[in-house]
Amino acid sequence: MKTAIKNDGEFTILEISGYLDFENCRPIAESIGELYAKNQGSKVLVDLASLEFVGSSGISSFVKSLKIFNKMKIKPVYFGVKSEFIKLFRLFEGAEPFEITETVDAAKSAALARFQIWQGTRIISKETH
């Protein structure tokens, strides 16, 4: 499995490719965590188009480890998720749904909309405190 980080204007794209299994799902979550630690207002997009899953335990662990980012106000947007795996994302998401789009352009739009809402919340909060 390989990860690559690309900057595309105001977006950070984490491309994950290769085969995912139980052993290598944690480093992906750590990579996303590092992106957020470096930039609290980051618009992170996760490209899963070239990712293959090996065994259901790898998928379960992967999705469960990504749930922590769903609690963030500016959570990552995932795109390129294969249809058979979207069901598993939905199964494990709980109260905080994963933001999944089909294309990078749709992911950018979703991330930008969420960021604008977050910015509005921050401005209101500063004015009222």
Image: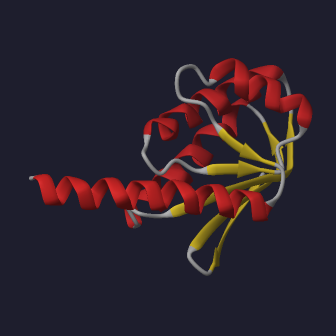
Q: Residue furthest left?
A: 129
Q: Residue at x 56, y 58 (%)?
A: 113
Residue 129 place in picture, x, y as percent: 9, 53
Q: Is residue 106 above or below residue 12?
A: above
Q: Is residue 16 above or below residue 12?
A: above
Expressed as whole percent of the image width and height from the top left, the position of residue 26 reads 58, 39
Which quadrant of the view contains residue 120? bottom left
Q: Nearer the viewer, residue 43 or 37?
A: 43
User: Residue, x 71% and y 18% (percent of image)?
Assistant: 91
Q: Residue at x 60, y 27 (%)?
A: 64
Q: Which residue corresponds to the image point at 60% horizontal and 68% vertical from the top-left?
A: 12
Query: Residue 1 appears at what percent x and percent y?
Result: 78, 51
Q: How many marks do you count on the picture?
A: 0
Q: Where 33 falls versus 40 (above or below)?
A: above
Q: Position of residue 65 (x, y in %)?
A: 57, 33
Locate residue 44 relative to residue 71 in the image: left or right. Answer: right
> In this rendering, would 95 be left or right of 106?
left
